[in-house]
Amino acid sequence: MTYELRTDSQHRYVMYRRDERYLPFGRDDDRRKAVEKGQQFVASAYPEVWEKNVGLVQRVRQFLGNNFHWHDRLTTSGADREVIDTLMSMVRGGSIVVIPEEPLDAGVATLPAKASSSSFWGVDNYDVAPVVSVASRYQSQLERLAAEHTAWAESQSAMDELNAGFMRKMAGTSPLMDFLFDAAGWTGKYGDKLASGPATPGECEPFEYNGVASERGEKIDLAGLPFDGPANSWLESEPGMKQQWRMFGADGTPVVDIDFDGHHGQPNPHAHNWDGLVRDHGWPVSILP
């Protein structure tokens, strides 16, 4: 049985299974070219236009139902667009071939068609009205983009999840990172998403330096700040001294310094990391969120 897909002024496009005999008296090269031409015809079609052609959709449903039993649901209750998309996909894959044949009224004498001139813009015949206007196709694309567009609330939620995940991995790895999380407002915003973690600068108990020497019997003062201090706490330099903050680690020794007005080759503010008794050269830092 012959299943016609569409007919235009030049050809009648017929659907076949790949294993069917089509063009039985043609050469292999002619059959191959016919298959390629049918694939080009289907690939150049607008699926949003074909799905509105009731007769075409019905013929495709009948062809799929009679030749591919696993598409029974599609042929009986599938959406028109789904039917057209399935046909195009199977033509691209080669399980269905569309063969351009002579129209049924090919024996009727007609005037020769006007030779179409080639065009830089890819238009073969300016006399043929387009199937769908550019404006309609553009509007259809806009509607599809609007339907698939991710809502701002969903994007914001996804960003919050990324930020919380980053904070969950980095919290506690460096006192400086904990301080920056707190300064940026992340601690209050994402803190409830952390299962557990070290104390942040905002949770440390305040203290005042009393000038008593440490139990080490020695200390290193830099910009008026002691080398030893209470664990997990921040200390600010005295008034009149170089403005500086120091973070003490769990053992009461310096971990991070933040300098505000002593650049010594670095922009202000900048941070220094401590490694035992050695303080590095410094790194630019911003404490703003």
Image: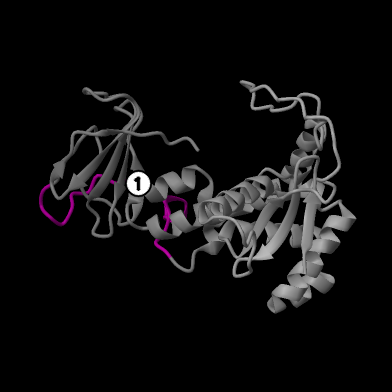
Pointer 1: what residue? 176
* Amino acid type, residue under disc 1 in the picture: Leu
Could you say where residue 137 lies in the image, as x and y percent from the top left? 78, 37
Residue drawn at 79 percent across, 71 percent down? 75
Q: Is residue 207 visible?
A: no
201 drawn magenta: yes
Furthest residue to the left? 217
Alpha-carbon neighbours of circle 1 within 10 Å: few (<14), some, or many (≥20)? Answer: many
Instruction: Residue 16 in the image: state x and y as whole percent.
Output: 68, 64
- Write down the quadrant of residue 258 in the picture: top left
Q: Quadrant of residue 18?
A: bottom right
x and y, in percent, of residue 209 in the image: 31, 46
Q: Please state if 214 lies on the left or on the right of 134 as rendered.
A: left
Left or right, 287 with respect to 251, comes to: right
Q: Nearer the viewer, residue 175 or 216?
A: 175
Which residue is pictured at 81% across the width and 37% down the height?
Answer: 131
State which region is magenta: 197-218
Residue in front for this viewpoint, 223 or 79:
79
Residue farthest right in this picture: 54
- Say above or below: 95 vs 112: below
**Prevailing secondary structure class for the magenta stretch in the rendered image:** loop
Tell me residue 166's x, y (percent). Answer: 44, 54
Q: Helix, strand, or loop for circle 1?
A: helix
Determine if the magenta segment contains residue 259: no
* Foreground pick, 120 / 200: 120
Q: Is residue 159 left or right of residue 4?
A: left
Can you say whether 266 is above or below 142 in the image?
A: above
- The residue drawn where x is 40% and y is 51% is 178
Can residue 284 be spotted in the picture? yes
Q: Residue at x 83, y 73 (%)?
A: 76
